[in-house]
Image (cartoon, rainbow, N blue to C red):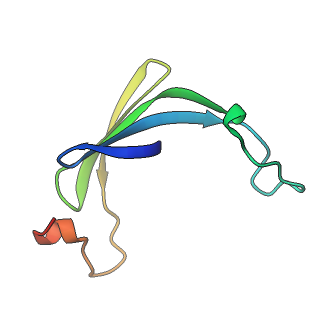
Amino acid sequence: MSEGRKTSGNNFSGTLFRSTGPAFNAVPFTPITPGNLTAVGNMTFSFSDGDTGTMTYAVNGVSVTKNIQRLEFGAIKPLCSQGSQ
């Protein structure tokens, strides 16, 4: 999702692109340009709190919804799960 933007409350949406080009480790690497990108759908993230949410996307007319959960690496929580936004 490129340039995902806040659409309302805890929701973020953006356009999904398919890119074509060389492998990331190709030598020499040819930079990806707008000509290498094709819009294929859209994606939305809706967060219920700092730890959980829903990811919904549609690619070439096929819609998918997935529940997502924050993977904790330590005791520090994001501000939104501490009651301040």
Query: Exactly how many numbered labels are in the figure?
Result: 0
Residue that appears at 89% across and 56% down: 27
At 42% from the left and 31% from the top, the residue drawn is 42
Placement of 37 over or under 23, stated as above or below: above
Q: Residue furthest right?
A: 28
Q: Is residue 3 left or right of residue 44?
A: right
Residue found at x 35% / y 65%: 71
Q: Percent from the top left, x then y, of residue 3?
A: 45, 45
In which quadrant is the C terminus drawn? bottom left
- Rendered position, 62 above or below 36: above
Q: What percent of the width, then of the height, locates residue 83?
A: 10, 69
- The image quarter containing residue 69 is bottom left
Q: In which quarter of the view is residue 18 placed?
A: top right
Query: Residue at 55% across / 34% down in the picture?
Result: 17
User: As drawn, is 16 to the left or to the right of 85?
Assistant: right
> Please, which residue is most extreme toward the top here?
61
Relative horizontal placement of residue 59, taking residue 27 as reference (left or right): left
Image x and y of residue 21, in percent = 76, 40
State the image coordinates of residue 82 (x, y, percent, origin top left).
Answer: 14, 72
Instruction: Single out the residue that lies furthest toward the bottom.
Output: 75
Does 82 appear above or below 53? below
